């Protein structure tokens, strides 16, 4: 950003047939557009990173659950659930 501003100021001082203010204003607009584009890219990268982290967390949880939820553990969970329902009114 500072490089673009310095470039805009340098080019604005050259003249080149156009008033200094117009060149400086043009380069300031270019710098503002570049900044907005960088910020948009940063937001998109952050969203992509959050999605990647979420997917990795789900994959890790799925893998851990698959290792720990053996047929015997499943049977125990179901049995405990059925026992918890006994004696409850419908």
Image: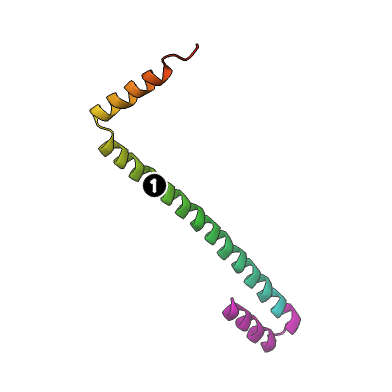
Tell me where residue 50 appears, x and y as whole percent: 47, 52
Dot 1: what SS? Answer: helix
Q: In this view, does 20 lie to the left or right of 57?
A: right
Quick check: 67 above or below 88?
below
- Looking at this view, name the residue that lies furthest to the front: 87
Which of the 4 image quadrants contains residue 19? bottom right
Q: In this view, does 9 lie to the left or right of 47?
A: right
Residue shown at the point (37%, 48%) measured from the top left? 56
Which of the 4 image quadrants contains residue 87? top left
Quick check: 63 above or below 15?
above
Quick check: 55 above or below 7?
above
- Looking at this view, name the residue that lies furthest to the bottom: 14
Quick check: 72 above or below 87?
below
Residue shown at the point (73%, 84%) measured from the top left? 20
Q: Main secondary structure of the magenta part?
A: helix
Does the magenta segment cover residue 7?
Answer: yes
Tell me where residue 3 appears, x and y as whole percent: 57, 80
According to the picture, the residue beneath numbered tag 1 turns out to be 57
Residue shown at the point (37%, 19%) measured from the top left? 83
Name the residue nearer the viewer: 26 or 57.
57
Q: Quadrant of the N terminus?
A: bottom right
Residue shown at the point (53%, 61%) measured from the top left? 42
Name the residue nearer the viewer: 20 or 65.
65
Name the residue nearer the viewer: 38 or 27.
38
Tell me where residue 38 appears, x and y as whole percent: 56, 65
Name the residue nearer the viewer: 70 or 83.
83
What are the residue bounds of the magenta stretch?
1-22
């Amino acid at each position: 950003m500072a490089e673009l501003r310095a470039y805009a100021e340098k080019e604005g001082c050259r003249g080149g047939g156009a008033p200094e203010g117009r060149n400086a204003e043009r380069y300031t607009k270019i710098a503002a557009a570049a900044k907005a584009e960088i910020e948009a890219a940063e937001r998109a990268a952050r969203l992509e990173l959050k999605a990647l982290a979420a997917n990795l967390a789900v994959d890790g949880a799925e893998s851990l659950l698959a290792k720990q939820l053996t047929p015997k553990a499943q049977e125990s969970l179901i049995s405990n659930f059925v026992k918890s329902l006994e004696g409850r009114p419908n």
